[in-house]
Image (cartoon, rainbow, N blue to C red):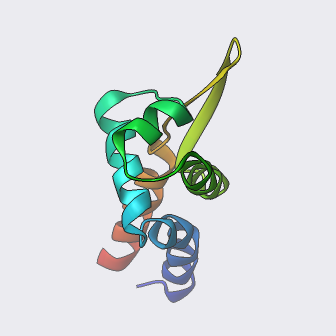
């Protein structure tokens, strides 16, 4: 096992692990994965969270790179962005299995 490669792989995936420690963000991601694209208002309607709370969690998730946003007219539509996270998890798994 290449220790440096493994530590680097852990470091790369930690933002995603950290962001999903929160149950509310897990719930928001589940909604996004099930429905594809949603606005803040649509997400607020599917949870018990306030609109400001949903916006706060979405900002953290955007910063961690696990979701993406697209401006469509006056709406901002949020969707999962899991491909980079999955690649990092695969890299970590490969490093651990070496």
Name the residue at 62% across, 51% down: 52
Quarter assignment of residue 12: bottom right
Identify the image quadrant of the N terminus: bottom left
Foreground pick, 78 / 44: 44
Callout count: 0
Look at the image and tell me whether residue 30 can be seen: yes
Q: Position of residue 83 (x, y in %)?
A: 45, 43
Q: Position of residue 86 (x, y in %)?
A: 40, 52
Quarter assignment of residue 34: top left
- In this rendering, is residue 53 above or below 96? above
Q: As drawn, is 36 to the left or to the right of 78?
A: left
- In this rendering, is residue 10 above or below 23? below
Name the residue at 61% across, 48% down: 55
Look at the image and tell me whether residue 98 can be seen: no
Foreground pick, 16 / 55: 55
Name the residue at 64% across, 25% down: 70
Foreground pick, 63 / 92: 63
Q: Position of residue 21 (x, y in %)?
A: 41, 73
Q: As drawn, is 93 to the left or to the right of 88?
A: left
Name the residue at 47% across, 59% down: 88
Identify the image quadrant of the C terminus: bottom left
Foreground pick, 92 / 62: 62
- In this rendering, is residue 75 above or below 86? above
Quarter assignment of residue 73: top right
Residue extending farthest bottom: 3
């Amino acid at each position: 096992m290449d220790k440096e490669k493994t530590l680097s792989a852990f470091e790369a995936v930690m933002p995603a692990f950290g962001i999903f420690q929160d149950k509310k963000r897990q719930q928001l991601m589940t909604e996004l994965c099930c429905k594809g694209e949603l606005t803040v208002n649509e997400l607020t309607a599917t949870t018990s969270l306030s609109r400001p709370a949903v916006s706060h969690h979405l900002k953290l998730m955007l910063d961690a790179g696990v979701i993406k946003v697209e401006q469509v007219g006056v709406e901002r539509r949020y969707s999962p962005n899991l491909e980079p996270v999955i690649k990092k998890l695969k890299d970590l798994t490969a490093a651990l299995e070496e």
